[in-house]
Image (cartoon, helix red, strand yellow):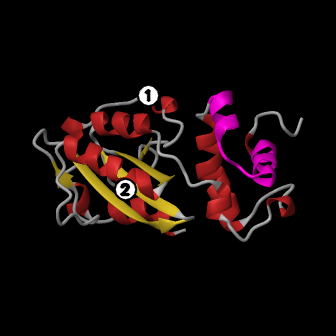
Amino acid sequence: MKIKNLFKRFQSKKQRFRDFKQEEFEELDLSKYVYPHFNSDEEASGPRVYAYHSTFLMRHEQFGALKQIVTENGFDLTDHDFDTPIVNRNNKAMALMWRNEFAGLMVVLITNCVALIDQVYRMRPMPPLPQNSFPDLDPDDYPGSLQGNIEYWCDYHWHPYWQTLTQDEKAALPLTEGWREFTYWHCEPGAWD
């Protein structure tokens, strides 16, 4: 998948990761970041990039808030290019990329700015509703294991997002009956027990 390979592509050229300096890197407890989830490249082979990365899906209407958070953390998005990290006044670095996917925006964020990570997490990016991401798909056709785009969407975006919601928030989502049942069977712990 293109998105999964972006961090590797970014990591492959020395000039791209030189701005993510080891002395600016702060260790984080990544277990608290459910959606969007952040990772580091500690296990990656090759030179280490001292940054965290996340790939998440969000609604188009939330993108302005994301850009505002990025700007408030000192990163100027004017003429930004994903291949060239932006360095802010505190020597923190960030690279941001987005594209249309699943009726929303697939966002890739690489940064060593802990404040930016915390604010992006607290903004609670929300993937588009399943009936919007898959308007021509009948969820009743997927009672068991998933494959392809719907598997990727469910495993990496909808399921982790669903886990961040309270029971009241889950009930308030305007899901169709079929997509609510799909979500129950594919996202609720113990549904298959």
Answer left or right for 66 relative to 163: left
Residue 48 visible within the image? no
Main SS type for the magenta part? helix
Magenta region: 166-186
Left or right position of 157 against 48: right
Observer-nearest residue: 125 or 22? 125
Q: Which residue is drawn at 76% across and 34% down?
A: 189
Query: Of helix, strand and loop, which one carries label 1?
Result: loop
The residue nearer to you, when weighing 133 against 85, is 133
Determine the secondary structure under disc 2: loop
Q: Does the magenta stretch include residue 172?
A: yes
Residue drawn at x 67%, y 53% is 154
Q: Which of marks 2 and 1 is nearer the N terminus?
A: 1
| Disc sitting over residue 46 in the figure | 2
Quarter the N terminus occupies: bottom right
The C terminus lies in quadrant = top right
Give the quarter of the image for residue 60: bottom left
- In the picture, the disc for residue 15 is none
The residue wearing badge 1 is 29
Give whichever of 60, 184 is nearer the camera: 60
Neighbours of disc 2 within 10 Å: few (<14), some (14-19), many (20+): few
- Tell me if 26 is positioned left or right of 120 in this view: left
Task: Name the amino acid type tagged 1.
Answer: Asp
Q: Residue 164, image x and y in percent? A: 58, 34
- Say above or below: 40 vs 81: above
Which residue type carries mark 2? Gly
Determine whether label 2 and label 1 are within 8 Å by CB: no
Residue 85 image position (x, y, % from top left): 22, 57
Judged left or right of residue 153, residue 137 is right
Q: Is residue 116 visible?
A: yes
